[in-house]
Amino acid sequence: MRVIELLDKPAVRYEVTEHPPAFTAQQMAAAEHEPGKYVAKPVIVKADGKYMMCVLSACYKIDLGALKSQLGAKSVELAEEKEIGEIFDDCELGDGPPFGNLYDLPTIMDKALETDDHITFQAGTHEKAIRMSMDDYRKLVEPKILEFSYHMTS
């Protein structure tokens, strides 16, 4: 799995945990007993026909209008499931890690994550999660920071 190889190279401190199968970031947050604000989910979008990875908290939704405006794009749309499966060819569908650089994608992180001390995310399977410091994540990914999400109300 590409993400473990990346994390092992620079000797980044991280923890891998196992949990019952989780098919959404919010389910994984519950299984890991982790507040949704610390659980990052990657959302693949097409901005003017080019794929980008947007990373936001599990308890947030992407605001495509805000993203379009901040990118200065003519169009921004969610990628289709088939396209996502082709991008994350080393992961179970829906469980790609928030490392666009591993998949030759620009990575945009939502401002709401910026001040968190750590980040937790799916490790490429429905049963594993990785937890690492936000500082290490930002050093490895070098995401562009934009404000493009809103908190989901339950």
Image (tube, rainbow, N blue to C red):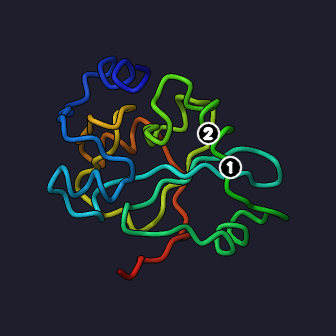
- Name the quarter where the C terminus is drawn: bottom left
Q: Position of residue 25 (x, y in %)?
A: 36, 54
Q: Amino acid at mark 1?
A: Ala
- Examine the image and state in which quarter residue 66 appears: bottom right
Res 79 label: 1
- Residue drawn at x 37%, y 18% as measured from the top left: 5
Q: CB under 8 Å between callouts 1 and 2?
A: yes
- Residue drawn at x 21%, y 58% as measured from the top left: 30
When the figure is inspected, residue 83 is found, relative to residue 78, above or below; the finding is above
Q: Position of residue 103 (x, y in %)?
A: 58, 30
Q: Is residue 61 left or right of residue 12?
A: right
* Count of numbered labels shown in the rendering: 2
Marks 1 and 2 sit apart, C-alpha to C-alpha, by 7 Å
Q: Which residue is mark 2?
A: 84
Q: Amino acid at mark 2?
A: Ile
Q: Position of residue 15 (x, y in %)?
A: 18, 34
